[in-house]
Amino acid sequence: MSTDFTLNANGREDTGKGASRRLRRLAGEIPAIVYGGKKAPAQISLTQKDVAKALENEAFYSHIVGLVIDGKSEDVIIKDIQRHPAKSVVMHMDFFRVSKTTKLQTRAPLHFINEEECTGVKLGGGLIARSMTDIEISCLPKDLPEYIEVDMADVEVGQTVHLSDIKLPKGVESVALSHGSDHDLPVAAVNMPKAVEEISDEAPEAPATEEDSEEEASEE
């Protein structure tokens, strides 16, 4: 992975909701926690503007981050981001420590490619319906992808793309599929527009014949 991310943080001892509110309101900082590995969980704070800038890059969400806490660096991944319901403000973050020699589980975003060239769309008049935006994966930190591609080029109307249809990068496994074929979940499908389906379901009326007209006239 070519992009490197580094965040500077400070350790903090003042915890609780009141302390977190003061951090956000007075210091422009974000309360966060780091856990995992052999170390005890650590309460930290991050600068809001530094985090906001990092979040502009999609790779940041699924990348190993160098978290420098009071001058000491450790490798982490983002496990959770809590946002304000009405404002574009991060309220809290969770980071998980990772080791270069130990596999980790995290979520990787899906990038759907060749949607405009999709057979079911271009020739069949279908519409693409996505069921997932990311998937849970397991891999070593060095193999962590920024995203995973889902190629829609050859998908026809009525077909569904499942997890097993996705070509994963070398060294990357699907956590769901590791639990068995029953967990081969749908990722996307190409469906006919609803209005078209409703029209096709209705049987066309047979045109009236001369005999029908004569029978109607005789009945009258």
Image (spheres, helix red, strand yellow):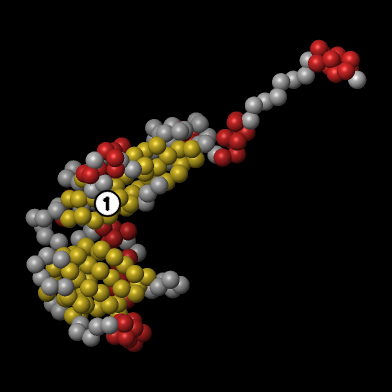
Q: Nearer the viewer, residue 40 or 1?
A: 40
Q: Residues within 10 Å of mark 1 (few under 14, many from 20)?
A: some
Q: Residue at (50%, 31%) from the top-left corner? A: 124
| Percent coordinates x, y for residue 194 in the rendering | 56, 40
| Up-down relation of residue 54 to residue 102 (above or below) | below
Q: Which residue is mark 1?
A: 136
Q: Residue at (29%, 60%) from the top-left corner? A: 61
Q: Residue at (57%, 35%) from the top-left corner? A: 197
Count of residue discs = 1
Q: Report the residue that reaches farthest toward the right.
A: 220
Quarter of the image that includes the N terminus? bottom left
Q: Is residue 51 left or right of residue 213?
A: left
Quarter of the image that includes the C terminus? top right
| Up-down relation of residue 6 to residue 123 (above or below) | below
Q: Report the residue that reaches farthest toward the front.
A: 219
Q: Is residue 141 left or right of residue 81?
A: left
Q: Nearer the viewer, residue 80 or 213?
A: 213
Res 168 seen here: no
| Up-down relation of residue 143 to residue 17 (above or below) | above
Q: Is residue 148 left or right of residue 189?
A: left
Q: Is residue 37 left or right of residue 9?
A: left
Q: Secondary structure at mark 1?
A: strand
Q: Residue at (34%, 83%) from the top-left corner? A: 21
Callout 1 amino acid: Glu
| Up-down relation of residue 72 to residue 158 (above or below) | below
| Percent coordinates x, y for residue 122 in the rendering | 49, 34
| Percent coordinates x, y for residue 84 in the rendering | 40, 73
| Percent coordinates x, y for residue 33 in the rendering | 22, 73
Res 120 seen here: yes
Q: Quadrant of residue 158?
A: top left
